Amino acid sequence: MSRLPALALLVAVTSGTSAQELELTDGSEAVFEVPAASGNEEVVNQAFFFDAPGGIRNALIQLSDGGAGRDIDIFLRADQPFSETAVADDLFEEADFWSISGFGDEFVNLQDFSSPAVGGRRWHVAIVGFSGPAVDARLSLTFSRQPAPDNAFEVDFSNATGAGNCNTAPWNDGAPYTPRDGNDATTVGQARRNAMLKAAELLSAELSSRVPIRIRACWRDLGPSENGAQTLAGARSNRLPINSPGLPRDLIHTQATATRLAGTDVCRIFGGFECADQEVIISFNEQAADRFYYGFDPADSSTPGLDFITISMHEIIHGLGFFGLLGSDGRLETVSGRQVADVFVHQLATLRNGAPVRLDDPSLSDADRAEAVVSFDNLLWIDDQAAVQESNTLLNFEAGLVRMHAPTPFNPGSSVFHVSNAYCDLMRPTNALCTSESLRSLGMSRRIMDGVGWADSNGRLPFIGQYFDRARAGHGFDLQLGGTDSQGREVYVLTFYSYETRGGRPEWFQAVGVIDNGAFTGIRNADGNGFPRYLYDPGREPPQQADPDTFSQVAVSLNAVANSPACTDGVDRRGAVARVSFQWAIGNQVGEWCAEPLVSPATRPEPAGDFGGLWFASEEDQGWGFSLENIVTEDGTVDVFVLLYVYAQDGTPVWFFGLEEDFTFGTPTTVTLFERTGFPRIREFGEVVDTEAGSMTLTLREPSNEPGAGNFASVNVTYSEGGAWIRDETEIRRLSLDR
Amino acid sequence: MTTAQLLLGLVVPLFSAAGGDEPASQPLRVELKWERATTGQGSKTERYRTLMSRRGIERLDAPSLPPLVVRRDETGRWIIEHEAAEADHSSPPVQP
């Protein structure tokens, strides 16, 4: 239930026009008559709209005729109203989402991970009634700030759609079963169903969907054991949609992904009456039925049979999206006469002159792709969010990107659509050489699923400002909005303050990046590093230049946070305003932290008086700066927290911090600065030692990004290991934009 | 806890967002203005199919990866992996 007050429906008629405008608000419900229509006649109404606040994760809009049996549809358009003369044909052209079943019961989830994302925009609603008598209909709207629930999957054991070649009898096998390892069934059929449901439950803990993803579970005759080998199971997506609502343009997706991103089910996306259509079809071999182990615990050498749950999970993931259309010849799929890629192949890359190039990039030929898929070490997953994980044991190879399975010769069964055998997780090509437990988890493949349509969010990060991890208090990072790129995407600047492993001296790193697939990642510089530290030499231009010698990358992800290892480490994180996964790689070190905002946005001043953000001096005195957070206290005064990012005598980056309570804006105010020595970032919970190091005097008159606003800083701070940073009445301005 | 304690200790966030649930309002009956249009021949499903095609929306048939197969390796361990079929699966394979 939303925390927003449920407001009554507001009704207004726009002055000066005859257009009717009706605003829906969270929790509101409107009842109205859909007038009769006959023959080829249809009735259309476009009166409703609603404003989705920036922070919401879902808007569920439902239209129902209460079972009267009238065929009514709903269309939704972001930002702009539908054309005034629109009929259903025009609505189709203009809509971003719709629900168009053959019934009078429609729904759409507008979500933060769909495109366009739900929040921070106006949505326009159009309703169409097809031929039939007049009926009363209800239209309702519900906002949610919660992530999608953990019940993404439904299993159909009864072949509800009556599809051929689907034997359901083994799910009801009445032979006795002795309960074991968590499966308390007493018949073999029940044990199989329990194990299948357990597989779905384990996947639900890692992947979310507001619309249930249905799995048709069948048994079929897939053959006997021959030459010591026997087929166990296979799965596939029911269909492969392209360009349906919520999908990125011109990329083939699985049906499950299309359902998830459209926010409604198959018959409501594509029109029709087959609302029981499943997204994924999995088939097990009847002739191998006795070879499976149905216990809930992962199988080991002592368990009789082959791990049914792990096999089911692996196959279902293929059916959900760990799958594509690329073979040994390197040809892409042809749709309506055009070569198009699927979303999985779109995320594959190969290194050209040391830089990753997407496999569907026009510069690559079929021969280039054919070479990559048998290259062993040059078929990579392009997303740095996947790369910067502790489980990526190949971080120091191939630009740090996750290596995919590309054996020579090409193996049609396993090549491309598995991670390399170098990793142990659910989506490796074989079960060999890994523990049973590791094969039960998506592991690094979870981030690969983010890239093919399973990201938990595709909108803005929930918080712009300073973050920290309770298990590493003393380290932290500041994430600020810096501008937009040529594609209109928001560009962020992330500054990480931490400590060197040896000696605990303070150091800082900085990344510039964008949010894609639910995660901020640093844009790689010419050296291939996305999260460099900068070294300062006043005798060169510019004086600060990225350290080329240390591999670095960073990701701040909204995906799979709640169940991530970092956020389930036993640390009490109750009361967190929001949580993100902070993944970093620096040299040979990799970390994944559970980070949260340092202060609540509710404690900030109003935007016009919000001085928070990154500040710098000028192009002539670049390379240093500070981040500032201002907090309105209960008595109305403002406290200011400053992190100053400068350099030691040897040019290496160091930082200082200071806090001034009851800060006075508009006049010079001095903040005492401290140097902090801390504990390595690869550890949890450690000591920090603070030493007074100097001060900075700030004159802050206007939170402006322009010079001439009257903002000045004087700095006089000394680093204990050598070097002082001194500036006198230097004009400063804000680097980051309003947040 | 003062801001100083909070930030210098870097321990906990200052406040959680406040607020609470309120009951939903009653449905409101509204009179809508409807436009009427007469469409061409053909069922809604046929029309929608044409309109979807115009937007580049298609549903392709889905091949599957070759199925999982179990066999013993040279050490006698059970190995489970996708069968290496002879056909290239970029051509839609026969469903296992």
Image (spheres, coloured by chain):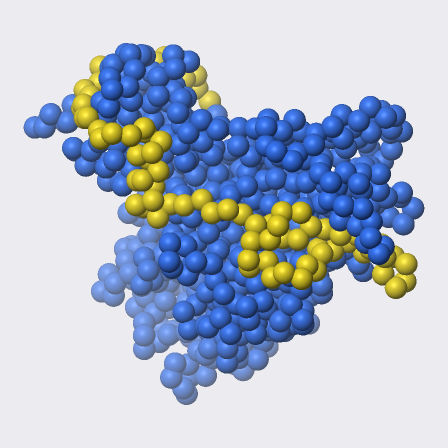
Q: Position of residue A19 (x, y in %)?
A: 15, 27
Observer-nearest of B80 and A553:
B80
The residue at 43%/39% (across/down) is A262
Q: Which chain is yellow?
A: B
The residue at 16%/33% (across/down) is A84
Query: Given the current orientation, which residue lies at the most extreme bottom position?
Result: A539
The residue at 52%/70% (across/down) is A369
Observer-nearest of B57 and A353:
B57
Is residue A519 something that shows in the picture?
no
A617 vs B5: above or below? below
Is residue A366 something that shows in the picture?
yes
Q: Position of residue A638 (x, y in %)?
A: 40, 46
Q: Position of residue A391 (x, y in %)?
A: 68, 60
Q: Is residue A460 left or right of residue A651?
A: left
Q: Which chain is blue?
A: A
Q: Is residue A472 left or right of residue B61?
A: right
